[in-house]
Image (cartoon, rainbow, N blue to C red):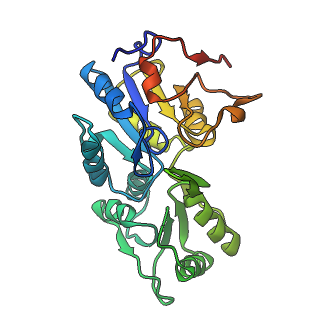
Amino acid sequence: MRLNNVFDRYELFIVDLDGVLWRGNELIDGSIETINMLISLGKSVVFMTNNSTKSRATYVDTLKEAGVNEVYVEQVYNSAYALAKYISETKKRVRAFIVGEEGLRRELELVGVKTVCKPYLNIKANIVVVGLDRKLTYRKIAVAVKLIMEGSKYYACNTDATIPLEYGLAPGAGSIVSAISTASGREPEFIAGKPNTYMIDLCLRDYNVEREKVLLIGDRLDTDIKAARRAGIDSALVLTGVTRIEDLKNLENPPTYIIKSLSSICSTAKPLRYYS
């Protein structure tokens, strides 16, 4: 595999996971080989996902099991980590009620946040944190709404309406956030994931790379591509996840590149490119 000359000028590749490397439990053809090729060329590669279900350490294990030759926890940015980072830098003496999974709980506890996961109606918490929760119950929503209406701060990992799985699209964290917001009458005060640029800002703070040499590769116009545009970096949209070719008509703010899949950056063909 060889990197297309169009993409060789980039030094830092920010790669989304769901819909780019895999769909659910299925790897996308050529994705892992492409990551290993970038690493072998000396390119900096980071993995950036709105998915909060796994901790960064678990994502490292998942990436290694998928076949990535070299990956460390410092290369992983997900919305659970970003939200934990934000809370640790802005709040003191926090007790958080979590609507989410183990990865979110783990990242919060790593920065010293006390967490409550069991939805007892009499629990005390000054923050409600919401992410994707595949064991969601009515009681969890009810407790979250009760706490928010009593004055707890309300934060969300992301507002993705759907996530791409091997069989198609499934409800994402945004569906849960919408339910809680509708019932409580309040919107999240902070959203850690894309299209918010917070994760990108954290990454660029850690990697001393000029913005014109950074490329974000993702599958969603409303999160990945929008976040890249807001952050002032180039973007490449892949068509292996949420976005379909019919979604690309009459775009007001198109990505820098549109490619069929991650492995297309190795193609000798010139990618479809838009200039805004």
Determine if residue 58 is in view. Answer: yes
Q: Nearer the viewer, residue 226 or 164?
A: 164
Residue drawn at x 53%, y 62% is: 155
Q: Is residue 234 above or below residue 118?
A: above
Looking at the figure, which quarter contains the N terminus?
Answer: top left
Q: Nearer the viewer, residue 245 or 172?
A: 245
What is the number of callouts on the image?
0
Q: Is residue 105 above or below residue 148?
A: above
Looking at the figure, which quarter contains the C terminus?
Answer: top right
Within the image, what quadrant is residue 9 found in?
A: top left
Residue 189 at x, y percent in the picture: 59, 59
Within the image, what quadrant is residue 110 found in?
A: bottom left
Q: Residue furthest right?
A: 250
On the picture, is 247 further left or further right than 258? right
Residue 164 at x, y percent in the picture: 53, 49
Determine if residue 189 is in view. Answer: no
Residue 275 at x, y percent in the picture: 66, 16
Q: Residue furthest bottom?
A: 122
Q: Is residue 212 above or below residue 123?
A: above
Residue drawn at x 66%, y 27% is: 254
Residue drawn at x 46%, y 11% is: 268
Residue 230 at x, y percent in the picture: 59, 33
Residue drawn at x 53%, y 37% is: 240
Q: Is residue 219 above or below residue 6?
A: below
